[in-house]
Image: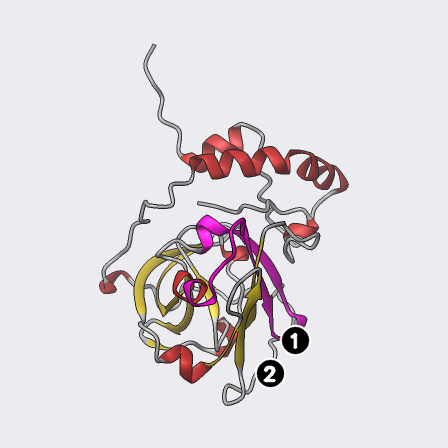
Amino acid sequence: MSLIRVPRRRFVQLSGLSLLLGGCGSSLFESVVGRATEPLNQSVEQLIFNPQKLAPEFPASAIEPDALLINTAERTTPQIDQATFRLVVDGEVDNPLSLSLAEILEMPMTSMVIRHVCVEGWAAIVQWGGVRLRDLARLAGPKPGVRYAYFESAGNTYYESWDIASSLHPQTLLAYQKNNAPLPVENGAPLRLASPLKLGYKQSKWITRVTLLSELPVRKGFWEDQGYEWYGGL
């Protein structure tokens, strides 16, 4: 019997474990099935994920400057004063942080050109620049047993949670730069998540707080609480 290679994402879909929904909500059936299969879904996704493996990056010539769409389904863009902005990193840590944007800009910057993939069926190759989330976590000093990162956005516009392995991956950034220019507010300034590991709905904009936790919160994510898959990996 010949071995048929099935892409990772397709494997999860064929297994009936993935509920990547294409709109702004889900049917009752999809919500019930999603809640029932989520623990197994998480386990399979985390088993497949390799925290040491880097996702493909692209040359600057591949950047598609007009391809990154603004999700009109998101709530109103918050008003943020960058001069008084603070990023809080707290939760189950030894050294909670409260950093100004200037302090974050002084940290080593990582730049990457990656493909941003939206669950609605489009993609864009984008350059992101920012600070690695693992560097911020290292400063905060996570306590033993931390398994999740929970992200809050300004003005209660969005909330999200990730597994800790994906959060601390070297290609997971809190980005303040897009296509070698300051990040526009409509794309999430002053800070947003950027990573080739997750679908677009996992990549929160306007982040003001990162909380490291040992237990997954009841409110898992803005779209996940409406039926989307929690892990959201690529």
Residue 153 included in the magenta stretch of the image: yes
From the top left corner, tell me how far across and down residue 47 is, in percent: 46, 35
Q: Counting other residues with Cα less than 10 Å from the Cα at mark 2, is it few (<14), some (14-19), or many (20 or more)?
A: few
Q: Which mark is residue 155?
A: 1
From the top left corner, tell me how far across and down residue 148 is, in percent: 55, 52
In which image quadrant can residue 234 be found?
Answer: top left
In which image quadrant can residue 30 be found?
Answer: top right
- The colouring scheme, among rainbow, by chain, secondary structure or one colour, is secondary structure
Residue in front for this viewpoint, 230 or 46: 46
Residue at horizontal 41%, vertical 84%?
102
Horizontal side of 62 relative to 183 (left or right) equals left
Residue at horizontal 39%, vertical 53%?
169
Is residue 209 in sight in this rendering? yes
Q: Which residues are magenta?
A: 138-167
Residue 152 included in the magenta stretch of the image: yes
Report the amino acid beneath label 2.
Gln
Element marked by disc 2: loop
Give the tally of numbered discs. Answer: 2
Residue at horizontal 69%, vertical 34%?
36
Quadrant position of the N terminus in the picture = top left
From the top left corner, tell me how far across and down residue 209 is, in percent: 57, 70
Which residue, given by chain and number where applicable, does mark 2 sit on? 79
Report the amino acid beneath label 1.
Gly
Q: Counting other residues with Cα less than 10 Å from the Cα at mark 1, is it few (<14), some (14-19), or many (20 or more)?
A: some
Farthest residue in the top direction?
A: 1
**N-terminal of the two: label 2 or label 1?**
2
Is residue 25 in sight in this rendering? no
Farthest residue in the bottom direction?
A: 83
